[in-house]
Image (cartoon, rainbow, N blue to C red):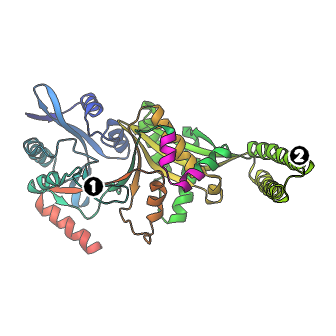
Amino acid sequence: MVFRELTEEEFSKFTQEYELKNFIQTTNMANLRKNLGWNIYYVGIEEDKKIIAASFISSRKTHFGQIDFYAPRGLLVDYKNKKLLTFFVENLKEYIKDKKGYNLRIDPYYITKQRDINGDIVENGIDNTDAIENLLSLGFEKSDTAEQVVTWTFVLDLDKTEEELLKSMRSFTRRNIQKGIKNKIVIRDASYEELPLVKELLDATGDRKNFHNRSLDYFQKMYDAYHKDNLVKFIIAEIHTKTILEDLNKEKEETKVTIKRMEEQKSKEEKIKRHRDNLEKIEKQIEEITKLQEEKGDIIPASTGVFMLFGDDLVYLFGGNKKEYMHFGTPYIVQWEMIKYAMKHNFKRYNFYGISGNFDKNDSEYGVYDFKKGFTGYTEELIGEYHLPINKFYYNLFKLIHKIRK
């Protein structure tokens, strides 16, 4: 085995073929981080003229001019192969030491144990605790914090037909999807020039739930890094008030005709009353949409989603909704349309991505999990972030500084 630097092309080829690839350990993300001020290096292990493990690592100066090294969602290596992992890590330590680094951080997209929809461990399921033991035996320390804040995800396998998927979903979720379909919500790709609108819709949810999204500059750089390779989608869901009014007015006239016919046929009064009540409901909806049209126009951007497309996964990375329009079903129809897109383009998994990992209904973030759970699927717990001290003096000094600041 030989440890060496890789070219960008060699690393890109490896990530396209590697089983446990992810959208973050890519040349696209490396270039994004480079544009954000990080230094980028590609390294790997070669055996018999074949790359068998690799990673891009990024670095930047921190306190006292010391350099922090970080492999986002890396390393791409078999963590259960102790010999290979040891060879990679020991060579990385020397490589980073030569570049005056004091620390290496990794946070692989690697699950701990297989879990079900409720977060419970699946009996006789996947168990990667021995991989964690291998990391700890090589000097890695589990971190209490993580740069990639997502350590729990929610995933839907796309091994059913559309009809089977809909049937497996919670009834509340199905009803909201049908509501979005009835309202003819338009789902479309946002252009680069519309990223401020995407950011506005993301911030609508962020402000409501007291968290801050990435900056507009970050999303613009993400677009530049990923869009050219068709690896990212910025989606906007629109309410078309004119279309809704046309449908409602048509439904109104059809209901009036039905009522007149039933009256002429002397149908039972309770049956006629149901249609009259429905007519009244339609007229109220027409009044509501007419007012909305007068205030907001024919087309209203209501929801957004940012999706990554890489390997077997279509990943729902960020989402945002204007609260006043959510009753039109826009958050649900965004997910359903993208699930159908994933199936059409042969993705194996629809990855709803981050959940808190706290399954207590009283938890402040339980609603995010509950929304995703309605589509059915299962949870994944990732192994988290690990730090490998390279220069122990500075590593321990910075740990002490961070502890004092807390």
- The residue lying toward the viewer, choosing from 125 and 151, is 125
The quadrant where residue 189 appears: top right
The amino acid beneath tag 2 is Arg
Q: Residues within 10 Å of mark 2 (few under 14, many from 20)?
A: few
Please report the residue visible at 22 percent of the width from the left and 60 percent of the height from the top.
Answer: 64
- Magenta-span inclusion, residue 130: no
Q: Is residue 196 in sight in this rendering?
A: no
In the visual, does 331 lie left or right of 107?
right
Query: Residue 196: x percent and y percent?
Result: 57, 48
The magenta span reads 163-175
The disc placed on residue 261 is 2
Quadrant of the rendering where the C terminus is positioned: bottom left
The disc placed on residue 122 is 1
- The residue lying toward the viewer, choosing from 107 and 65, is 107
The amino acid beneath tag 1 is Val
Main SS, magenta region, reads helix
- The residue lying toward the viewer, choosing from 389 and 211, is 211
- The residue lying toward the viewer, choosing from 269 and 406, is 269
Query: Residue 50: x percent and y percent?
Result: 15, 27
The disc placed on residue 335 is none
Quadrant of the rendering where the N terminus is positioned: top left
Q: Is residue 1 in sight in this rendering?
A: yes
